[in-house]
Amino acid sequence: MAAPLRAALALGLLAAAQPAPAPGQRRQAELFLEKYGYFRERGTGTHSPAEFSKALRGFQRVTHLPPSGLLDAPTLHQMALPRCGTDDGHGRAAPARRRRSSAQHGGRWPKRQLTYRLVNRPPYLPQHGVRLAVRAAFQLWSNVSSLLFWEAQDGPADIRLTFFHGDHNDGLNNAFDGPGGALAHAFLPRRGEAHFDSAERWSLHSGKGRNLFIVVAHEVGHTLGLQHSPVKSALMSPYYKKLSKDFVLSWDDILAIQSLYGKPSKGSAIQLPGKVFTHFQDWNTDLYSRDRQQRSLSTYYCHSFFDAITSDGDHNLYIFKGSHYWVVSGSGNASEPRALQPRWPGLPAGIDACAWSPGTGKFYFFKDPGAGIPSMSCPRSWDTIHELPQQLGYHP
């Protein structure tokens, strides 16, 4: 039997075995596909069976379901999962096409240095932890592109992040729907807006509620000009994914942002695993120690989320934050947070920079004694460089 005929028979048998969806289910699916851009035209009322089946196949391809064009149980289940409320760009399946579309429609900022402002936050989450999570989300993108970000604590900003309930004057199609469903949505440049559903239970941890860091990082991608990705492992995939130990950004995310803004101006792109972003609340003390409190009085932050990041000759990444550090192998495996003192006795918390020398095989740490004085320049210039004693150097 010819292969095309076998395929046609299989599809026929599948259709015969599939119970017809209830009228209410079909209408809800139609509204869902319309909201997320799978019909050529919006707001036209009901659609023909052929149009509906074509839209379903587009959705099924993007979500890696068999493209049967049938409203089956797996498709209904997928539609009910929590996701981003931004549309899927008419179900485009090719990453390259998605990126070209972003660029062709003005989906990029004309500058590389952007400000952001957190307008409000969930009242049950600590302000310091939320600001940490937001800062980390922006740094995720600056680590792999030429972009730089600063936080504006008040006044105008290029990108504004706001929590809303229900209808918030973005049109009924963008009204939030309570827990589950659409968690957040954002707008391509240059509107610079990302909105989050206040009805969700947001969390700064990896295992409870909706992880704020991962959702903010996704929505920031939209504000920078990225559309949804059909790559399942991508941060810009439309569906919510829990923070895991794997790299937060996929190859598709990195290629997409670099196609708009280029590679980092200095050094190579830095990929970070999700494991180092799991407990923001535990780091509040590190970030808001006495000298950091003074630094936060500046209108803009010039300090990145982590204190310092460097790599050694074995391509291990060392990430420093407060009084702890992580080691990330080239394959992306991250250690548990380790205390600085056992490894480097006498090293103060909150270093400003670190470098590993291939000539000596040692780490060199830099600390700015004037950290208490706000600075508007970024990156900061060091008033004094402190080189640790030779015995504190690292010998592989």
Image (tube, rainbow, N blue to C red):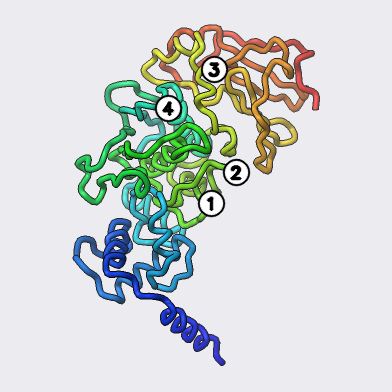
How many numbered dots are placed on residues in this image? 4
Task: Please report whichever mark, 1 or 3, sits nearer to the chain's N-terminal start.
Answer: 1
Which residue is disc 1 drawn over? Answer: 233
Which residue is disc 3 drawn over? Answer: 286
Task: Please report whichever mark, 1 or 4, sits nearer to the chain's N-terminal start.
Answer: 4
Q: Distance between the residues labelled 1 and 3?
A: 32 Å
Q: Can residue 269 be seen in this view?
A: no
**What is the secondary structure assignment of the residue under circle 4?**
helix
Which residue is disc 4 drawn over? Answer: 130
Task: Please report whichever mark, 2 or 4, sits nearer to the chain's N-terminal start.
Answer: 4
Q: How far apart are marks 1 and 2 (CA)?
A: 10 Å
Q: In this view, does 318 lie to the left or right of 62?
A: right
At 39% across and 20% down in the image, what residue appears? 300
Q: How far from the left and from the top, in percent, is residue 238? A: 42, 52
Q: In this view, does 394 lie to the left or right of 135?
A: right
At 41% across and 35% down in the image, what residue appears? 202
Q: How far apart are marks 2 and 4 (CA)?
A: 22 Å
Q: Residue 246 carries which label?
A: 2
Residue in front for this viewpoint, 188 or 360: 188
Q: Is residue 367 visible?
A: yes
At 30% across and 38% down in the image, what residue appears? 193
**What is the secondary structure assignment of the residue under circle 2?**
loop
Marks 3,4: beta carbons within 8 A: no
Q: How far apart are marks 2 and 3 (CA)?
A: 25 Å
Which amino acid type corresponds to the residue marked 2 in the rendered image? Asp
Marks 1,2: beta carbons within 8 A: yes
Task: Please report whichever mark, 1 or 2, sits nearer to the chain's N-terminal start.
Answer: 1
